[in-house]
Image (cartoon, rainbow, N blue to C red):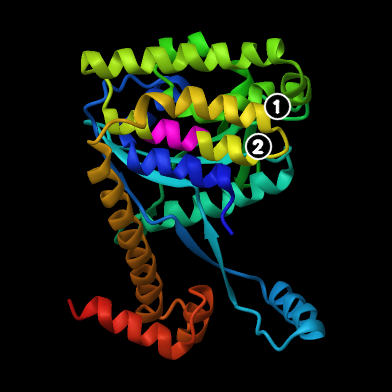
Amino acid sequence: MADVYDTTFRTLVYKCSSLVLPLLNETFSEHYTGDEKIVFDQNEQMIEMPEESVKKESEEKNKSSDAKSNKYKERITDTNFTVFAGNNKNYHLECESKPYSTNMLIRLYEYDTQLALRNSVTEDNTIRVKYPNTAVLYLRNISTIPDEMKMIIEVSEGTEAIRNVNVIKMKNYTAEEIIQKKLFMLIPFYLFNYEKQFQECNDDPEKLKVILNDLRYLEKELCALVNQGDLDPMHLKAIGKCTKAVSDQLAQNYDNVRKGVDDVMLGPILDLDIFNDYDEAEEKGRKETENKYLLSLLNHVNSGKLKLSDAASIANMSVDEFKKASEALTSH
């Protein structure tokens, strides 16, 4: 089951892609205007596992089931895409709700190396690989989260290539800064700034007002931008729905907090008929995403990178089901 916070992050990036540009400006000191074209790459990476790892996993699985261990492991990035603006740049963004772990750096290295290889250029006896600009959004206020992360790659004796991984901390942004810097895609995660105070706010209406007043300010500013024509109304709805999704998960044990968030963030959008068409488009988009994922697995099979049985297993299908679904897609 996909993590609610990861899903929220991906939804905003893919469905409201223009909202990611201000975040890039903030994180990488870019100067995007909002008119740039964004092209998304597939976010599934098939990584070949070392033989010892495959053998160990297979042994562990055989203790409890007859499931076979795959030689290839699927790694799913939160988002990776290219911004076309003269000097085209590749980006890889991750959203993390867990405490910092060195495993994150390992995952990022695996992801980024696969992305670099996919976008590599070969000519005669030379291959040029270009790593993406990478950043991680940490949602929780945890003291062990570093201000920056690095990958040091020893390319030869005494020579090192250093890659910086930017760290975005949700706790560093106030409601006012989010509006000033147009970091609207951070709004659904704003509740993380108050997570440690949920119990007090749930029990004390006056303390709850502090959270709700911040959200009312954000909601008021977003509605004003919609009325001015500076924010797509569909983006307003997406932000409201995503905020509810985060609230339902993060504040699941605090009924008063959840109800207050719903009243503030969903209130302005419930009566807009224009969103009926948007809901239909969302359903269509989910189906298109599933089809794209299936085609990606099929391409791995056709190129010899993945066995048919492994692809079917990853897709949670039998081999026959995978074949039928693939034939249905390719016959159109």
Q: Residue furthest left?
A: 332
Give me the disc on residue 220.
none
> Helix, strand or loop at disc 1?
helix
- What residue would you read off at disc 2? 250
Q: Is residue 190 left or right of residue 64?
A: left
**Residue type (three-letter) at the residue carrying disc 1:** Glu
Asked whether the residues under the numbered discs 1 and 2 touch, taking CB atoms below 8 Å apart as contact, a structural biologist would say yes
Residue drawn at (36%, 43%) of the image: 14
Bounds of the magenta segment: 238-243
Q: Is residue 178 above or below residue 153?
A: above
Q: Earlier in the sequence, mark 1 or mark 2?
A: 1
Residue 213 rendering spot, x and y as whole percentages: 55, 11
Q: Quadrant of residue 149?
A: top right
Residue 87 rendering spot, x and y as whole percentages: 26, 32
Mark 1: few/some/many CA within 10 Å (<14, 14-19, 20+)? some
Foreground residue among 138 and 146: 138
**Residue type (three-letter) at the residue carrying disc 2:** Leu
> Is residue 161 visible in the rendered structure shown here?
no
Give me the disc on residue 195.
1
